[in-house]
Image (spheres, rainbow, N blue to C red):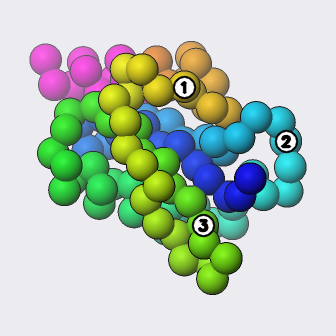
């Protein structure tokens, strides 16, 4: 296991972000600068893919660098440590803005 986070992005807006692995450990904590790096990299990947709703997994190398591990169809991706209602409410807000 390592530091890996799943970020859900809809219409180029982050709707959820959480630690990828089950359980709780010290690797799940992000500092403010780390959180910013993770979210910016996920948004960049989403922009390059130009997919309306995507899940992007971001991991940290031993050097400290953050990389994209994989992207997947957000409809079928597990929510990891993201509360379901938070994710759904954020999606609802994005969808209502675009109607």
Residue hosting label 3: 60
Q: Would residue 1 be visible to someone looking at this image? A: yes
Where residue 59 appears, as percent x and y from the top left, is 56, 60
The answer to whether the residues at label 2 and label 3 have Cβ atoms under 8 Å apart is no
Q: Is residue 98 magenta?
A: yes
Examine the rendered structure and indicate whether residue 10 appears above or below residue 85: below
Quarter of the picture containing the C terminus is top left
The residue identified by callout 2 is 24
Residue that carries the numbered disc 1 in the rendered image: 78
Q: Which residues are magenta?
A: 89-99
Q: Which mark is nearer the camera, 2 or 3? A: 3
Please state the horizontal and vertical placement of residue 53, each as a whole percent of the image: 28, 31
Q: Judge from the rendering whether residue 50 lies leftward or rightward of residue 75; answer left or right.
A: left
Around disc 2, counting alpha carbons within 10 Å, would you say few (fewer than 14), some (14 to 19), or many (20 or more)? few
Q: Gap in Å between the C-alphas at discs 2 and 1?
A: 17 Å
Between 21 and 85, which is closer to the camera in this rendering?
21
Residue at the farthest right position: 25
Q: Secondary structure at mark 2?
A: loop
The answer to whether residue 96 is left or right of residue 83 is left
Measured along the vertical axis of the image, is residue 38 above or below residue 75? below
Q: Left or right? Give the position of 84 relative to 7.
A: right
Q: Which mark is first along the chain, 3 or 2?
A: 2
């Amino acid at each position: 296991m390592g530091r890996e986070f799943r970020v859900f992005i809809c219409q180029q807006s982050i709707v959820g972000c959480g630690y990828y692995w089950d359980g709780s450990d010290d690797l799940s904590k992000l500092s403010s600068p780390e959180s910013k790096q993770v979210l910016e990299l996920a948004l960049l990947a989403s922009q390059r893919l130009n997919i309306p709703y995507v899940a992007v997994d971001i991991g940290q190398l031993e050097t400290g660098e953050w990389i994209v591990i994989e992207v997947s169809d957000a409809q079928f991706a597990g929510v990891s440590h993201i509360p379901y209602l938070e994710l759904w409410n954020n999606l609802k807000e994005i969808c209502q803005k675009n109607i």
